[in-house]
Amino acid sequence: MDENKLIACPLFKGMSKEEHDAFLDRNVNEVIKFKKGETVVRQGDIINAMYLLVDGVVRTQMITDDGNTLEIDLLEAVIPLAPAFIFASNNKYPVDVIAMESCWFLKISKSTLLKEMVHNEKLLINFLTLNSNMTVFLSQKLQMISIKSLRHKLSIFLLEKTTPEKNYFILKRSRTQLAEYFGVQRPSLARSIKELEDEGILKTNGRVVTVLDRNKLGKI
């Protein structure tokens, strides 16, 4: 486990290494490994514990009513799965979680997590902040889904991934996964990317994506 990643976990923000190490020593019930491509949890599974991703990357996806796969997000260690749903009345996973590489999880029971938060205000505030940020992300994702134009969706995505100072990024998704993220078919995504390249707005080289003209992209 990478100790630097553990320190960066939003659940442990402001806590010392000794504090979060002691928390894990007291509360981890099980250490679980998943291989690349394995399903960690399925949409609709009951949440009976907190799964803390401590190593690896997972993708979250949802199957729509018409049978299409909609990617929600990529999650990198260290972060808990579906924290906003752990104590919900309908405490079920809202998405499928798939390991994109070998992943390690620490399993912490709901009851021990609750007891810890009752006696640790910092942990409680971090948990509430994490849930609030997740709510903001989901509202932004809903807004993205509601946009009909793929060019509009793609422009928002590219502007969020880059800045005027750093106009490129490494795409962590495959083209198929990116199409699922936007809720479209891969050929449609390929056409839109090609159009942006032909217009001199975008350049791609493998997984390196460079925004050449932020002004034009912003006007879309």
Image (cartoon, rainbow, N blue to C red):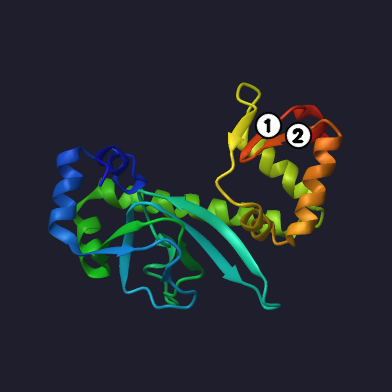
Q: Nearer the viewer, residue 214 or 208?
A: 208
The residue positioned 39% from the left and 53% from the top of the image is 128
How far across and how far down the image is residue 15, in percent?
24, 40
State if disc 1 and disc 2 touch (CB < 8 Å). yes
How far across and how far down the image is residue 8, in percent?
33, 40
N-terminal-most mark, 2 or 1: 2
- Quadrant where the image shows the C terminus: top right
- The relative height of residue 45 versus residue 105 in the rendered view (above or below) is below
Say the numbered circle drawn on residue 202: 2
Q: Nearer the viewer, residue 167 or 25?
A: 167
In the image, taking residue 5 as reference, residue 172 lies left or right, namely right
Q: CA distance from mark 2 to mark 1?
A: 6 Å
Q: Nearer the viewer, residue 141 or 69?
A: 69
Say the numbered circle drawn on residue 210: 1
The residue positioned 27% from the left and 45% from the top of the image is 122
How many other residues sit within 10 Å of disc 2, few (<14), some (14-19) or many (≥20)? Answer: many
Specify the quadrant of the image occupied by residue 219: top right
> Of the residues shown, which amino acid type is indicated by label 2?
Leu
How far across and how far down the image is residue 121, in percent?
25, 49
Q: Secondary structure at mark 2?
A: strand
How far across and how far down the image is residue 72, in percent?
57, 59
> Of the residues shown, which amino acid type is indicated by label 1?
Thr
Q: Secondary structure at mark 1?
A: strand
Residue at the outermost front position: 206
The residue positioned 37% from the left and 49% from the top of the image is 77
